[in-house]
Image (cartoon, grey):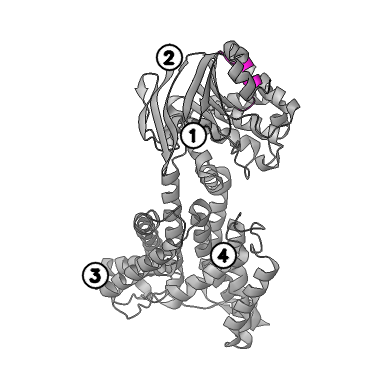
Amino acid sequence: MTAILQALASGLALGAIYGLIALGFNITYATTKTFNFGQGAFLVPGSLVGVSLLLLAAGKPHFGNLTQAEMTMTAYVLATLASVVVVGAIGIALYYCAIKPFVGAGGLNWVLSTIGFGIIMQNTALAIWGPASIAVPSPLGSEVWRIAGAGIRPQEVLIAVVAVAVMALLDIVLRKTRFGKALRAVAFNPQAAAIVGINVESIVIAAFVISSALAGLAGILIAPITTASVFIGLGVALKAFSAAIVGGLTSPRGCMLGGFLLGVVEALVGLWRAEMREITIFLLIIIVLVVRPGGLMGARSVEKI
Amino acid sequence: MTMLAIEGLKVRYGAVEALKGISLQVGQGEVVTLIGGNGAGKSTLMRAIGGLVKVAGGTIRFENRDITDIRGHDCVRLGIGHSPEGRLVFGDQSVRDNLVLGAYARRDEDGIASDIERYFGIFPRLAERQDQLAGTLSGGEQQMLAIARALMARPKLLLLDEPSLGLAPLIVREVFAVIRRLREEGMTILLVEQMANQALAVADRAYVIETGTITLAGTGAELLRDERVRSAYLGA
């Protein structure tokens, strides 16, 4: 029972990460019918930039290891902001290099261009940071919390809380604010959006900035659990992509739901037999898609013909 | 005073020349209608004025300002409201939010709120359904919403593209009643229509467009009596 609770907590934390990245897929897909296939690589600067800034601030080389004393909550919050800003800015570059030349032209060139952009970025990171991973202490310490007998890592709680807060905030922004209504208007029909005076391209750029910033946030949130390294993103991004498809690429709430669902299933099955984890998850994905092709909360038909 | 002046306007879609040198004027306070068959270039002309297609030649001037190469989203800020062909209401947002988005280029919150109430007064069906998603409205209601959304920008010139398309005769009458009311209030309107009869009756002046060229121009009453118009567009 405690093992299940423990797995549930890990699953929710991991699922929150999937959900954040999946939400990024949703926002750009809604506005451009494209998304960043290289999103996994965006977790890399997310984790490394913030951590390296803290290392430099502590007077160490940028690829050393951080001690617990150097990782205060203030330091972590600042590192997170730095990561989000830097990776968000990379999102602008992504738009101009990998999306703008191909969007609306039909075809799948944007798939390769976004994968390529990610690979370029990952290898640039490799040149800067090298292949070794950096141990990142959690700002809440490494002491395991005992909740109902189950040992729960404080960073897992932090991840879930931050991710849920960010998701709730985005949900409100998309539904209630002028920007959110404009973004949804662009998603619904770019021409109609232009007619009422919405600058469609600036909304699209904003969508890529948000999507990238979410991946950056995911990178720094997960770093204390996985360590920060050039290789952290790929597996996570594939699961996040699956989460978006299962939950419904067209639905923000569906993407979040998909994330949590995948995280929890993965953790619970892993408890039973680790090698069954991926098998179960991807079987489940196929079954869901057969029954509901648009995902759990997605539109009934994904593409209008 | 001339509000909109178009000279020798050309638009190409690939190798096809959709507009082959169109010239027309709309004076302040005038209702001008453009009639013509399917594919004559009516909507292309509207889209060119609204900055939604690239112009290949000629000029468009609005209030003596060259807007030939204007970007679509800047058009509304100059005072051109557009109720597009096919209505294009934001189907996944509420009726009220569609109106709020119509005022996207404005920043006067109080004015926007009072305008929404004003159009709810003019279009009571929209008031009844203000919290409903626009996509769930009937065609006629969506058309009213598209017009109201365009008016929310407080335009000086209203582009009305095929407002009667696909609507039942009774609803078409309602739409034209709205156009008459706007005309009485002094709104300048460029109306594109296939319902030539109704359009000519409401218009001060009219142009006939055929395969990208203006073939006939005159007052609404003149064209209503014109033999060629009667046989080609009025089924007489």
User: Mark 4 or mark 1: which is in front?
Assistant: 1
Is B114 drawn above or below residue A223 in the view shown?
Answer: above
Look at discs 3 and 2 and give the one toward the viewer: 2
Between the residue at mark 3 and the residue at mark 2, the CA separation in whole angstroms equals 70 Å
Q: What amino acid is labelled 4 in the image?
A: Ala
Percent across and percent down for residue A270 are 59, 84
The chain that hosts pointer 1 is B
Q: Residue at x 58, y 62 (%)?
A: A255
Mark 1 neighbour density, 10 Å: few (under 14) some (14–19) many (20 or more): many
Could you say which disc has been placed on residue B44 in the image? 1
Q: Quadrant of the C terminus of chain B?
A: top right
State left or right for residue B199 relative to residue B20: right
> Taking the image as drawn, is residue A223 in sight?
yes
User: Mark 4 highlights which residue?
Assistant: A244
Q: Amino acid at mark 2?
A: Thr
For the residue pair A161 and A109, the one nearer the viewer reads as A109
| Pointer 2 or 1: first along the chain | 2
Do tag 4 and tag 1 residues touch (Cβ < 8 Å)? Answer: no
Q: Secondary structure at mark 4?
A: helix
Mark 2 vs 1: CB contact within 8 A? no
Disc 3: CA contacts within 10 A as few (<14), some (14-19) or many (>=20):
few
Tag 2: Cα neighbours inside 10 Å, few (<14), some, or many (≥20)?
some
Report the span colored magenta. B194-204
Q: Which residue is mark 3?
A: A59
> Same chain for marks 2 and 1?
yes
Q: What kind of residue is marked 3?
A: Gly
- Mark 3–mark 4 CB contact (< 8 Å): no
**Looking at the picture, do discs 4 and 1 lie on one chain?**
no
Give the side of residue B112 with respect to residue A71, left or right: right
Give the residue pinned by disc 2: B2
Q: Position of residue B62 (x, y in %)?
A: 40, 22
